[in-house]
Amino acid sequence: MVKVTVDGIPVEVAAGSSALQACEAAGKEIPRFCYHERLSVAGNCRMCMVEVSGGRKPVASCGFPINEGMQIFTDTEVVRRARRAVMEFLLINHPLDCPICDQGGECDLQDQAFGYGADHTRYHENKRAVTDKYLGPLVKTVMTRCIQCTRCIRFSTEIAGVPELGGISRGENLEITNYVEKALTSELSGNLIDICPVGALTSQPYAFTARSWELKRTDSIDVCDAVGTNIVMQARGAAVLRIVPRINDEVNEEWLADKGRFVVDGFRRRRLDRPWVRVDGRLQPASWQDAFATIATRLKDVPGQRIGAIAGDMCDAESMMALKDLMETLGSPNIDCRQDGAKYDTSRRDFYTFNTGIAGIEDADALLIVGSIPRQEAPVLNARIRKRYLAAGRGGFPIGMIGAPNADPTYAVDVLGQGPDALAALADGTHPFADVLAGAKKPMIIVGHGALTRPDGQAIARACWDLAAKVGAISPDWHGFNVLHTAASRVAGLDLGFLPGPQGRDVAGMLDGGVDVLWLLGADEFPTDRIGPETFVVYQGHHGDAGAARADVILPGTLYAEKPGTYTNTEGRVQEAFRAVMPPGDAREDWRILRAFSEVAGRKLPYDTLEALRARMVQASPVFGHAAWSRHGTSDTTAPDAGTVPVSDAPLRPVISDYYLTHAVCRASPTMETCSGIYVHPAIEAAE
Amino acid sequence: MSVQSDAPQGAEPTHFAFDEDSERQIATVLAKYPPERKASGVLPLLYIVQKQMGRATGSAWIPRVAMDVVAERLEMAPIRVYEVATFYLMFNTTPIGRYHLQVCTTTSCWLRGSDDVTAACKAATGITSFGETSKDGLFTLTEVECLGACSNAPILQVDDDYYEDLDGPRTLELIEALRRGERPTPGPTIARMACAPAGGRKVLREDAVQKPQGQE
């Protein structure tokens, strides 16, 4: 630690800090454009000028190293004049188009011009103009507004791992561009919008929609993947207009994947906003009473063994709890939350969670990825792997992968094999990567759903666990066995035991006429065409998708933006989302629908309030009782059950074929549809 | 100063590959850097590209496909090559004429008559302003900053060669010679050796030694 004084306030900061960090520690706000805590220091905007003792000139604090006893002055006449001069230069070429700029109201330049801008310009030449660039369907550019802070270049190069942006030409002609008219190939490109301090990079789908001060902000959790990214829903009236990330260093730092950000225009399209009942083969609008009565009538005399329920990938824990209890009262053991047919040993929680923790990746020193493409399954988590990879330097963080990636993973990987046979080679030490894992102090293994959804999924998980135990990845202070989930509801579902009971059927067993009545809670990601023709299907959900198309009764439920809900991410971290807007039409909160139906069916569920339901959840699984998640290790290396199917050598396949269209909400979103056309199916787009 | 911009439509070739000459030069360049730092060779490689284009097509410029080839060869992101190629004005990112006429117009040259050189270039080639290429495709006229040969001002750099001590008429002659396919010897265009004093030696001359007063 180094002692410095900032405006007379003594502070202690870590050695190697910059003057700007020291000022922050002292509570002094330093204006800046190019400096960003999570990016490398560029030092090119010159806005963060301060004076230091003994210096003859003001210095740019972001890149100025501190030393013992240094005195920093942040508010002297010299500093103020320097900053005013910098601001005057920045404003020479910046257009005065704030009234038509989407950044207005949340613009760093606007805010800082308020403090350091002059009341008039002394510049009477022509301003420079820059042609706008095409960066794809998500990021809109107005390059004349660019102040060349280079944050976007550094973000795409360092965080996103797609070095596609750069500054071409020089001097007055410098332009930020990708030089070629090509969409940015990153699942994190939306963060460029947040990172741009001016209105040069703004959101294309959100263009000219609303002003930042009109929006009501509600904390929520992203359910498009299992990372549990902390987000803020920004709504005006009844509509969520945009989603931006919320800082949580443990989970997403301050990033948000594109799907979680731009899915928002699917919120109000293809919505189920009233109950429907199928009469003579056609769905007819109905009242809640009629819909409930129809289901209750159909359920009469059906034995519990012939009733089933499947929970979807975006469900909150509350609704799954209510559905599980409802099925229990109906005597049904046939419940399943694993639409993709994944297999886990759920006898212990660390058999199916990401035990190292997302922040824990930064402590790991070797990584093996089995049957997962983190870049598509969890882009934000992938950014954390890349961060570790960059921090470790050349070769410092060896990454092995089993199952070839279908896209650049954004870090160097050693593809050890196509199929699980590579695991055997690691286990018996014949593959050189085995020595890498064995030599590492904190190795970690990520098992993805490319492996777990196979028939031999449990056997692969077992092999990974055994390997982890063998290389010392499982110890009282380090847990290197990780399951990377793709469904936001999965861990909560497993925690609550939303799994087939004794003699219960799983998803595959409920299809092809395995049950007479099938209750789908937002479940669309399984072969709905394989539901038996005689099966009576109740679809409770928010979007008219595969499940609703097959349904005999549709109960309009709510999106994650429209209900208070609890979500457990892949780490097993329990997080709470709040209601941002009211559901449309007759749609109701999902647990309330189940509670109301239970009464009609004569099997009243024992809770009337959300609090009571949550108390029931704690009873079902104590993890819902304590909010804090902490890193853990274990001394118990007892391996998970290997299942009945032995490991086969078939190649591991990616579990996501189209990142932009993985669930019902994004399939309803025009933006996601466009992205899919541009990024995933460019050939089809070109042919049209 | 010339403004960099992308090549006009249709000018961009579809394919670029290094020829044997270039490969030999590349081997020499890359030998200077450790393999994991071979991106350091981006400047010489771009220069090699430009030279090869000059040899092959008569227009020494760097098309984008060639930048991609350089990026691939040096295992760096293409945008990093674009940045370098567009930063240095000596790299032409648009096609140029067979002869690249680069007039220095910085102070020394300007004081010594670079305006006449410019005017002569324009008159001889039909070019009306800097950055243009003549209609016959032979000449491109560029305004450059100090070429560092002020003692021989004004300077006209043709491709890699300096023609010094120019004036209007001698510039016209030079351009006519180029048009005939000749390459006059570079250097001073007046009776002068390199940057030795114009009109012969002025100092340390035996015949000019004046004996001190009072000595016979």
Image: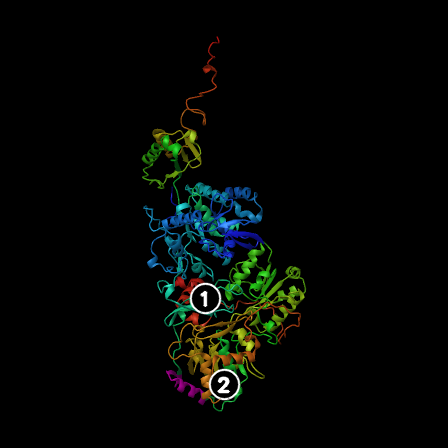
Q: Amino acid at mark 1?
A: Lys
Respond whether the residues carrying marks 1 and 2 are from the same subunit.
yes
The circle drawn on residue A413 is none
The chain letter for the residue carrying disc 2 is A
The residue sitting at the front extreme is A8
Residue, far bottom: A301
Q: Is residue B11 visible?
A: no
Disc 1 + disc 2, Cβ < 8 Å? no
Secondary structure category for the residue under label 1: helix
Residue annotated with mark 2: A605
Q: Position of residue B194 (x, y in %)?
A: 45, 27
Crowd tier of the residue under label 1, counting other residues whose Cα lies within 10 Å: few below 14, some 14–19, many 20 or above: many
Q: Quadrant of residue A274?
A: bottom left
Q: Nearer the viewer, residue A244 or A182?
A: A244
As drawn, B112 above or below A625: above
- The disc, 1 or 2, on the residue closer to the chain's N-terminal end is 1
* Residue nearest the viewer, comparing A646 with A272: A272
Vertical relation: A318 (above or below) A32 = below
Q: Residue at x 58, y 46 (%)?
A: B34
Q: Position of residue A273 (x, y in %)?
A: 38, 78
Mark 2 burial class by Cα count in 10 Å: few <14, some 14-19, many 20+: some
Residue type at mark 2 is Leu
Q: Is residue A129 visible?
A: yes
Q: Secondary structure at mark 2?
A: loop
Q: To which chain does the residue with label 1 belong?
A: A
Nearer the viewer's eye, disc 1 or disc 2?
2
- Residue A611: x percent and y percent? 49, 79
Any magenta on residue B51? no
Give the magenta part as a residue range.
A277-297
Numbered badge on residue A259: 1
Distance between mark 1 and mark 2 Cα atoms: 36 Å
Which residue appears at 33% of the width and 39% of the height? B127
